[in-house]
Image (cartoon, rainbow, N blue to C red):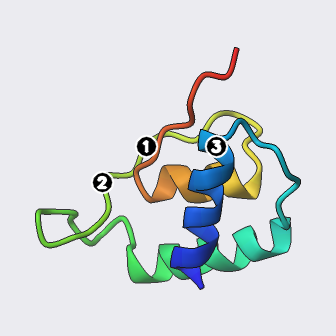
Amino acid sequence: MMEIVTHTWDLAEALGHPHELDPELAEFALTTARTVLPDSRPRDTATPFAPRTQAPENADPYQQLAAWLGRTPLDHA
């Protein structure tokens, strides 16, 4: 589930957020990500995710999930 939700965000981000995404799914995936990839677990070459990035202030659940998994939102300005 975490993978599908995250890749859905990836696609929406790449397309400029064309659709509203379900925040409950992101919350569930974020909880899973924090359990599977806690801060105490180092992220090395064996980990398929980049180091955690800082989520923007007031980030929605998808932005928090993306940051936890090492993604950085594109600048759509």
Asked which quadrant contains residue 50, the reply is bottom left
- Which residue corresponds to mark 2? 50
Could you tell me how many numbered marks the image carries? 3
Q: Residues within 10 Å of mark 3 (few under 14, many from 20)?
A: some
Q: Point out the frontmost of discs 1 and 3.
A: 3
- Which residue corresponds to mark 1? 53
Q: Are marks 2 and 1 in contact (CB under 8 Å)?
A: yes
* Percent of width and height locating residue 56: 63, 34
Looking at the picture, tell me which residue is in the foreground, 25 or 37: 25
Q: Looking at numbered disc 3 in the image, what kind of residue is underneath it?
A: Glu
Above or below — where is 36 with respect to 11? Answer: below
Which of the two discs, 1 and 3, labels the residue nearer the N terminus? Answer: 3
Q: Looking at numbered disc 1 in the image, what kind of residue is underneath it?
A: Thr
SS for tag 1?
Answer: loop
Q: Is residue 38 left or right of residue 21?
A: left
* Percent of width and height locating residue 22: 85, 67
SS for tag 3?
Answer: helix
Asked which quadrant contains residue 7, the reply is bottom right
Quarter of the image with the N terminus is: bottom right
- Which residue corresponds to mark 3? 13
Which of the two discs, 3 and 2, labels the residue nearer the N terminus? Answer: 3
